[in-house]
Amino acid sequence: MNNPDKMKFETPNITAENVAKIAELFPGVVAEGKVNIDLLRTMLGEDVFADEAYEFTWVGKREAIAEAGRPIRKTLRPAPDESKDWDSTENLYIEGDNLDVLKLLQESYLGKVKMIYIDPPYNTGNDFVYRDNFTTSREDYEEEMGLYDEEGERLFKNTEANGRFHSDWCSMIYPRLVLARNLLRDDGVIFISIDDKEDAQLRKICDEVFGVGNFQGRILWKKKTNGNNMGVIPPVHDYILVYSKNRLRVADIGFEISPDEQAAGYSNPDNDHRGPWDTMDLSANHKGPYFPITNPLTGQVHYPPKGRYWVFNEKDVLKRIEEGRIIFGKSGTARPVQKVFLKERGIAKRKAESWWDSHGMNEDATEELTALFGVAKIFSHPKPTKLLKNIISIVVQDGDIVLDFFSGSGTTADAVMQIAAEKSLRLKYIMVQLPEDLEESLKKADNNAKASLEVAIDFLDKLKLPSLLSELGKERIRRAGDKIKEENKDKEYIGKIDAGFRVLKLADTNMNDVYYAAGDYTQDMLSLMEGNIKPDRTDMDLLFGCLIDWGLPLSLPHKHEPIDGFTVHTYNDGDLIACFEEKISETAIREIASRKPLRAVFRDSSFASSPEKINVFEIFKLLAPNTNVRVI
């Protein structure tokens, strides 16, 4: 039963949305929600390949593609007690399977993320990878392959003995990248760490998801000083693939040049009051104005060199000569050039080249985490903050959002906070991490991984925290934030440093099944059943469920207050006002409406009858006609 006044609490069906877009362009090829591919090919003519074409495929690819567009009924439950600076922070730490989390973020953060960095499982045969069910039912797959334990464990060790070794990994990463691309801004960039095992496959998948033309480059990062005689050619580096959302919108990707470096070559031989300056060519090789420029002192006439054109029109040239911004060489008798002043230069950048051998190594990561936690080797294969700081610094600007949906040890969050503190920038991060059970992982781990797992479990036990990887990540970010604030306590902008984070946890929907299938029941049957909302859910759970459903950011300020004895929640000064009380008075409703929020939501059971509910909508039509009112 479709009710426009009812919240849907279901992620977008991306596949259905794509079919609708095709129907807009070619109405005749879609019938009953199905696309007639043969007819679509006919209408597109020669622009569609038929039997043969270059493509990258694997067993399970179709299901992996379909999974990206498949809707889910889940939510994110806030955990203020596990958070840091809940009321003021704009950072998010989300616990849960990142595939589902990315689906839930599709509306709130669609096209809003400037940079993504991920360090996914490398598929070495030792690392655990996410198992997503793409080709068969869980029961069939479990029986056939024996990869699930009795608890239906989602992580498994993908050994090379598995006949689907590469296929499983490709099916895991593909839908996550599709969803990640949706979250990137038009000028956004994604960086993906990988090693030799899946580098070739990842490159092909990214070419397909992001487009070959959006490949920005591949960084070779030297991660250790020697390869410990591993293999015929011992590896000492990893790859970092770099792709953009839209290459035409991406600004320079590079390292800022220091003021001292920028000043090199600048001087002020004529004591110009505008300070040190250098010269720059006045012509360019793209088509533009072409006219003679006359030296006012010598009368000599100058044209652009052959095949080139002036960068300014004639009126601008005369004005700039008068202002002393175009000179005829330092002698006054040479060809015209621009005078460029140091103080007028913006932030200059040096392009980030493909070989990184001085950007932190594995041993640096181990040392900094040992100093932070007081114990050695608490994480297995963490990335150094220096590497992440360099990656982030070549892309982000003030106000940007950084996402890492394989956040692991939390290095990305640490690096974001460090850069924000060093450069006085307001940066925000979203970390996503599966709450992997470390004790269960220990049972399956090889000897190399066991040592760090045992250290981590013992450390968390002493803190009386659950033995989960996500708990370790949160603790690292807490400690890193405290350290950053202490190191910057004397700086003027110390109060602006955001060292906190809101914890949100992936969970099943807040709503009972009756909420989604109300059309299947008669009114008499409904009266005998439980309410729409699960009994263990709080007002905060419901509030964040509404934020996700309405596509609002999850890090904005909110407050609650009593109005006529009823608890009312206000999000971001009126982006949303909600009351989830079992009953609400007309006085409270009128007060909420008088504040003219953009959105308002109430519990369906707050109204004893349909006339009462209709009255609420009439009140809003009168007092706040532009407010979008819904019920749950």
Image (cartoon, rainbow, N blue to C red):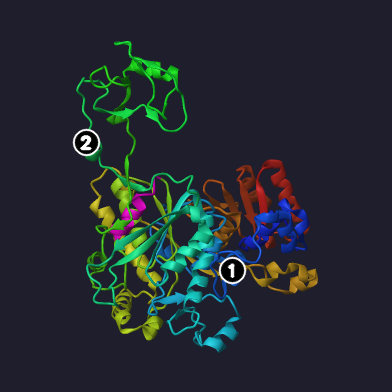
Q: Is residue 498 visible?
A: no
The stretch drawn in magenta includes residue 390: yes
Give the residue pinned by disc 1.
67
Q: Relative to residue 1, is residue 334 depicted above or below? A: above
Most common SS among magenta residues:
helix
Q: Nearer the viewer, residue 75 or 296?
A: 296
| Residue 481 to residue 163: above or below | above
- Report the residue that reaches farthest toward the left: 269
Q: Nearer the viewer, residue 281 or 12?
A: 281
Q: Is residue 21 left or right of residue 448?
A: right
Cα separation, mark 1 vs mark 2, equals 54 Å
- Check if mark 1's residue and mark 2's residue have beta carbons within 8 Å: no
Mark 2, Cα crowd under 10 Å, few <14 / some 14-19 / many 20+, is few
Residue 139 horizontal side relative to residue 131, left or right: right
Q: Amino acid at mark 2?
A: Ala
Q: Dividing the image into 4 quarters, which one contains the C terminus?
A: bottom right
| Quarter occupied by residue 314 | top left
Q: Which residues are magenta?
A: 385-398
User: Which numbered disc, 1 or 2, marks the residue that appears first in the sequence?
Assistant: 1
Question: Along the line of sight, which residue is nearer the eye, 444 or 32?
Answer: 32
User: Which residue in the structure is indicated by mark 2?
Assistant: 264
Residue at 24 percent of width and 27 percent of height: 276
Q: Residue furthest front?
A: 306
Q: Secondary structure at mark 1?
A: helix
On screen, residue 241 versus residue 12, left or right, reads left
Question: Element at badge 2?
Answer: loop
Which quarter of the figure has residue 468?
A: bottom left
Three-letter code, disc 1: Glu
Q: Position of residue 579 (x, y in %)?
A: 60, 56
Point out residue 303 in the picture as x, y percentages from the top left corner: 39, 21
Would residue 298 be visible to someone looking at this image? yes
